[in-house]
Amino acid sequence: MLKSALSQLQTIWTILQHSFTRSETVQYPEQKPYLAPRYRGRIVLTNDPDGEERCVACNLCAVACPVDCIALQQGVKEDGRWYPEFFRINFSRCILCGMCEEACPTNAIQLTPDFEMCEYDRQNMVYEKEHLQIDGTGKYHDYNFYRVAGLAIAGKDKGAARNEAEPVDVRSLLP
Amino acid sequence: MAEPGLGTLGTIAFGIAIIAAAVGGAAVLTWFERRLLGIWQDRHGPNRLGPFGVLQVVADMLKLLTKHDWVPPFADRAVFVFAPTAIVVAMLLGFAVVPFGPDLYVLDLNIGLLFFLGMTSLAVYSVLLGGLASNNKYALLGGLRSAAQMVSYEVFMGLSLMGVVMLAGSFSLRDIVEAQRELWFCIPQFLGLLTFTVAGIAESHRLPFDLPEAEHELTAGFHTEYGGMKFAMFMLGEYLGLILISAMIVTLFFGGWLGPWLPPVVWFGLKVFALICFFILLRAAIPRPRYDQLMTLGWKVMLPLTLLNLMATGALALWWRA
């Protein structure tokens, strides 16, 4: 009995000591919490180091997306590059899981540490390509898909990519 | 009844002032309690609206005032509406006998202490009737618990004060304060203070003993079906009870308005404030006991302690007088 009474007193004392501890609360709108660069927030489309858009409209992100919030249409430019004719993400569906980023073979689609995208009108949550495309390279500064891929485009023939051997003439018997 | 210390008009004005101050204080207390609880739980509490968030009180009040005033169709309408008013009226009447200063009081009854005990006991009816009239399982359980709680603590609540009455030789709260000029009763009547504090918390249904409400088990206990201003009345009654019990403990055990240098009213206010903070600390620190544990505590620990205190006080008082 006495022991339990002392235990109660000890509890009160412990709580009283908390008058002098700092508050754990982050006062959000004034005080922003630190978000890691790898934080999964608003989705962007990035450019390669040369300033060309990275997305090749392969549709892998749309396939990977568990909530089917990505829609796009592939087109081919005159120089042979693939690009999305439109690229649409419905952020009112998006669950920010990052599957699209993992699926992307060209590092084009990336998630950013920004989550403040409230809208009064649901339709405004649908982002078109011009809303998604940014000028920079995002998290990967050096990667350029067409420099390492075997696809021939204007100004880069087969075998001209980095670490790529000259094309082999399969009809020739010479070594 | 003794002659009023302020004159008839003055007493009426003071009574109205006390009602305003008590209701206002109870309203501000809702905010203050949340801030204090926040500090003790390492967070901020409501700090957005106005300086330190004090305008939260106004926001809450506006919200409660504009809520739909709804009576459930299955409830006993008359009792349902009456119940919340009873607690507020009873608690406010309890303030009538509290001496705020040597001449600052509404009533100086020669049975002031009994009047206080009677009024706080009446407040229990509010909870009981509210629980019963709601016609809801949880509300009924809350009312039931309130009744069980009442039989456990009302017994030793009155008895715990008899030591004070013996030492002061009077039921009048003014005389009790005057009798503490040499020594506050919190020292010779330490057991009385302990038991009365426990009973006081149970009386005002504050957290360690808020079994009738027990929102984790009974959704909201006796006021499950209440909303809007009727709910606000219950809350107001609870906070009024907190202030009243604090004022009573100060009057009976901590020398009321007595104190050096500062004016008596200020001393009284400071002591009440400190006690309210202590009660909020209890709420922050102590978990709710089980229903049977509370009854066990009341009957097997607090009642014997009170009787022991009563006998020892009586014996010593007689011995000293002889």
Image: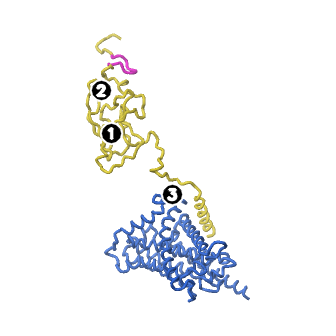
Chain colours: A yellow, B blue
Depth-wise, is mark 3 or mark 2 nearer the camera? 3
What's under tag 3, amino acid-wise? His
Subunit under mark 1: A
Q: Secondary structure at mark 1?
A: helix
The answer to which of A95 and B101 lies nearer the viewer is B101
Indicate yes or no whether the magenta region holds residue A110.
no
Mark 1 crowd level (few <14, some 14–19, many ≥20, 10 Å Cα): some
Give the numbered dot on residue B269.
none
Q: Circle 1 sits on which residue?
A: A131
Q: Position of residue A27 (x, y in %)?
A: 48, 52
Q: Which residue bears the numbered disc 3?
A: B44
Please tell me which residue is depicted at 46% across the width and 63% down the height of the picture: B55
Residue A84 in the image: state x and y as whole percent.
28, 33
Which circle marks residue A81 in the picture?
2
As drawn, the residue found furthest toward the top would be A174
Residue A30 is situated, as x and y percent measured from the top left of the image, at: 46, 50
If the image is split into quadrants, where does the C terminus of chain A sit?
Answer: top left
Looking at the rendering, the stretch of residues picked out in magenta corresponds to A157-167
Question: With respect to residue B288, does A154 lie above or below?
Answer: above
Q: Are marks 1 and 3 in contact (CB under 8 Å)?
A: no
Q: Residue at x 45, y 77 (%)?
A: B88
Q: Chain of mark 3?
A: B
Which quarter of the figure has residue A138? top left
Q: Is residue A165 magenta?
A: yes
Q: CA distance from mark 3 to mark 2?
A: 56 Å
Q: Is residue B297 visible?
A: no
Name the one closer to the observer, A92 or A160: A92
